[in-house]
Image (spheres, coloured by chain):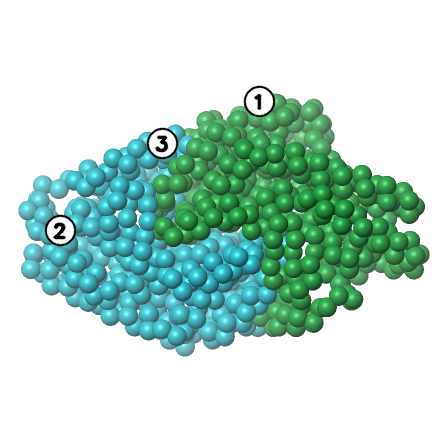
Chain colours: A cyan, B green
Amino acid sequence: MSQRPRAIDQDLRARAKRVIPNGMYGHEATHLLPDNYPQFFSRAKGAHLWDADGNRYIDYMAAYGPNLFGYGCPEIDEAATLQLAKGDTLTGPSEIMVELAELFVGMISHAEWAIFCKNGTDATSMAIMIARAHRGKRKILCARGAYHGAAAWCNPFRVGTLPEDRAHIVYYDYNDPESLQAAAKIHAGDIAGVFATPFQHEAFLDQHMPTFEYAKAAQELSSHEDALLIVDDIRAGFRLSRDCSWSDLGVDPDLSTWGKAIANGYPISALLGSDVAREAASRVFVTGSFWFSAVPMAAAIATLKRIKETDYLEHTVTMGTRLRAGLDTQARQFGFGLRQTGPSQMPQILFEDDPDFRLGYAWVSACIEHGVYFSPYHNMFLTAAHRSDDIEETLLATEKAFQMLRKGAKSLGPVPQLQILKAMVG
Amino acid sequence: MSQRPRAIDQDLRARAKRVIPNGMYGHEATHLLPDNYPQFFSRAKGAHLWDADGNRYIDYMAAYGPNLFGYGCPEIDEAATLQLAKGDTLTGPSEIMVELAELFVGMISHAEWAIFCKNGTDATSMAIMIARAHRGKRKILCARGAYHGAAAWCNPFRVGTLPEDRAHIVYYDYNDPESLQAAAKIHAGDIAGVFATPFQHEAFLDQHMPTFEYAKAAQELSSHEDALLIVDDIRAGFRLSRDCSWSDLGVDPDLSTWGKAIANGYPISALLGSDVAREAASRVFVTGSFWFSAVPMAAAIATLKRIKETDYLEHTVTMGTRLRAGLDTQARQFGFGLRQTGPSQMPQILFEDDPDFRLGYAWVSACIEHGVYFSPYHNMFLTAAHRSDDIEETLLATEKAFQMLRKGAKSLGPVPQLQILKAMVG
């Protein structure tokens, strides 16, 4: 357990156990995190997070992605609050929905139209419907292990789903053009869409940037099969580029899915499409109770404007690079090898020679005692609100964590949380 | 076209056509409404709605359900704004998530636990996963024509979906115990869940309250098959009762799905369950980027407290009954027959001798010219914000609409919008 106060968190967990299955669900449950992590939070500002007991953390999870400009960004909250005074969820959309669609489409090279929704899974599931409606074909090619949401067709676990839910989902290996082409060959003539995350960002694994050959193969194959290429930019969107994440590779998809950071934490996601996909998009019936709500749209407009007008992106790269360099130096000093992969602004930090994650878990567990919130298995996120001070304070904490780890490394046992994961994978 | 100003709306529609498929999508698109309906709105307060051109309407659609205490309800918006200052979408849930779960579960007789999500479809899709996880069975019994969302398994249209998406959905006729039992007999031993809306509230049709025999048969069949009974209270929740809508019938489901009005328009939905379903609920992986956001939870707490503490429900019944009586009198005076069905606070208004809806469409089209926003095909909603003045003003408008209708009834042609619907149904 933690040496920091946890009494309120413990009490909340006990209460939650009674009225929430398993005490918590989904990606923000702490079941897979070390025991000393807090479950409940009371407030946040900028890059800082306070748990229910009042302990402060420098946060590197950014709400698992939505926080791009800092928690409680005044300009974005002000835009949202002004819209709230006019109206939010009404009998029809607000006029600002058109403004948002124009602004967003104007920023993304491949996009000619937008549909707004709430969950990332809404956007990816809609992309599949549109891809299938496009030419009446069925197969959707997805990279093995890639996360596209938690609906039955893409849930990373299978409990409660049926084989029919993914009857026409075909898996290939990311960054492997031959695997992609082999999957396509088997289903030639029946391929509706090809899904790709902008880079490989799976939990518990090193991250890999896409090769040009892979991205190009995905595009050519989609084009050859008259299928739609779908870039799932929900997690990485606007973290790598101010355009679709594959724009730097010169690969324009037909559809791209967005969510997480596009409104700095206000609930809105989006599917963007090219003209090729417009006709199919106009035929599918898609909707949700709150898809037309104006407040998240006002927040999205304010966020997109900041994306266009500020150096947030370069700033997150600078801060991420500084953190990465500092951690590398410390790890060497203390005799550990770190595998720091992915873009520095979306870092994944794993340990060398740590097949069962015991070093990584012990290290982040020590970090959180010193006020730094890292994930032991999930990629993290720098934000525009992380300042040099935060990086320095983080590096002081990580140094102490490496010290503790060096002292205790040999006595570490297996990570009990990972038994839970094994049981879930089944 | 409308005789009211529509220039701004027309301009917005033209712009929307370029950046949104078909100019708009989903249930708030105006494709199925008369030509003189506005598409875009600028503000709302209480029971009133202003379109982009500044025309005011007394609104009976309540954002298709979410508005329960009036647009911009000060107490609810204040609770949300206070929470926004602390934090919204964070790296973990706020402590108020536990408070909300306790409050909600405490209000719903059958419920022992809650899972919060964003769309109604999240809750219904999750209910299916849990029902299937419960005993490893597959079949879900749904009433033919009932709306449970727009995911591939339940989309009212089939474009972009595959037969596999509903391979194990079995349809029965609402309010028909024999049809339900016949469907169950065919699939005995493989029934995972039985879905029922609290009453029959389909578009373009009269509404029907459930018979006790039907509700009881659904419960007994679920119990006998060790399947989960699921009441889909997304649309009707808290409109008929301060408990689950079937509580008055003495029928407790195993799962109930909620959304729409539970936070007065803030984006949150929920799945509530009994202890029987808890174990399965704790095994499925369900999540979404914004499912843990604190602001909609703060709004839900404020809304649920108002549901417990005010006479909103009795008030909506009083206002709905007054409207219904006034319309009946007017219709008789002008020689029309109205079919006013469903609970008076969720009225469906259709015309007798109007098989192709030309009378109904012409009448609502006249009403909107006089500042009353009705739907020609969808059930409507009274809110706590509808005052006696609003009902009186509405009845003045509807009287003028009946006058116009009497003059023009014989020259009415078929409704072109319904050709679009036919094409969608395919």
Q: In this view, does A367 lie to the left or right of B191?
A: left
At horizontal 36% and vertical 50% (from top left) the residue drawn is B86
Q: What residue type is labelled 3?
A: Arg
Q: Is residue A173 visible?
A: no
In the displayed structure, would residue A41 be above or below residue A77? above
In the displayed structure, would residue A346 be above or below residue B174? below
In the displayed structure, would residue A265 be above or below residue B303? below
Q: What distance separates the C-alpha of mark 3 from that of mark 1?
A: 33 Å
Which chain is mark 3 on? Answer: A
Name the residue carrying label 2: A401
At horizontal 67% and vertical 38% (from top left) the residue drawn is B316
Q: What distance separates the C-alpha of mark 2 from that of mark 1?
A: 57 Å
Density class for disc 2 (Cα within 10 Å; few <14, some 14-19, many ≥20) is many
In the displayed structure, would residue A250 be above or below residue A413? below
Q: Position of residue A318 (x, y in %)?
A: 24, 70
* Image quadrant where one finds the N terminus of chain B: bottom right
In this rendering, which labeled residue sits more in front, label 2 or label 3?
3
* Image quadrant where one finds the C terminus of chain B: bottom right
Density class for disc 1 (Cα within 10 Å; few <14, some 14-19, many ≥20) is few
The label shown at residue A15 is 3
What kind of element bears circle 1?
helix
Q: Is residue A70 left or right of residue B291?
A: left
The label shown at residue B224 is 1
Which chain is mark 2 on? Answer: A
At horizontal 24% and vertical 64% (from top left) the residue drawn is A387
Q: Which amino acid does label 2 sit on?
A: Ala
Q: Where is residue A327 in the image (x, y as percent from the top left)?
A: 15, 61
In this rendering, which labeled residue sits more in front, label 2 or label 1?
2
Have a look at marks 2 and 1 and say if they share a chain: no
Q: Where is residue A100 in the image (x, y as percent from the top left)?
A: 52, 67
What kind of element bears circle 3?
helix
Q: Nearer the viewer, residue A51 or B170?
A: A51
